[in-house]
Image (cartoon, helix red, strand yellow):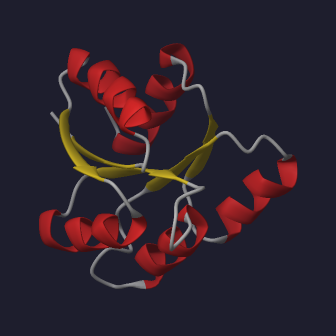
Amino acid sequence: MARILIVDDSPTELQALRRLLERHGYQILEARDALQGIDLARRERPDLILMDVVMPGMSGFQATRRLTRDEETARIPVFLVSSKTQESDRIWGLRQGAADYVVKPVEERDILPRMHAVLGV
């Protein structure tokens, strides 16, 4: 099954997403901030990245822009996962190169079909 990198500074959010995805057979990698996520993405080459937007230091928007413009990681789809619900945030995230934008709290029935579509499952 696919390997998913979750990048989120909230232990609660990391645990919730990990549990949801492991129930469906996904292998999970975790990073607690954007820089760690970028480093892990370069080293491990996951099949998909779920990136929080609001994190200390570098935001998920900035990290997504870096990942999608780096030839080593440009082919890894990034889903921004955020509590920011404004349409302008979604549009900005997609402009940074995100493949999708998912609003928290993440609903299984919402995210899984979108992940499957991107992963070709």
Quadrant of the rendering where the N terminus is positioned: top left
Residue 58 image point, x, y percent: 51, 73
Query: Considering depth in this image, is 66 or 2 the residue closer to the camera?
Result: 66
Q: Is residue 30 above or below residue 109?
A: below
Q: Is residue 80 left or right of residue 46?
A: right
Q: Quadrant of residue 37?
A: bottom left
Q: Is residue 61 above or below residue 88?
A: below
Q: Residue at horizontal 56%, vertical 67%?
A: 59
Q: Residue at horizontal 41%, vertical 74%?
A: 67
Residue 85 image point, x, y percent: 78, 40
Q: Is residue 12 above or below residue 24?
A: below
Q: Is residue 101 left or right of residue 108?
A: right
Q: How many marks?
A: 0
Q: Residue at horizontal 46%, vertical 83%?
A: 69
Query: Considering depth in this image, is 30 or 23 the residue closer to the camera?
Result: 30
Quadrant of the rendering where the C terminus is positioned: top left
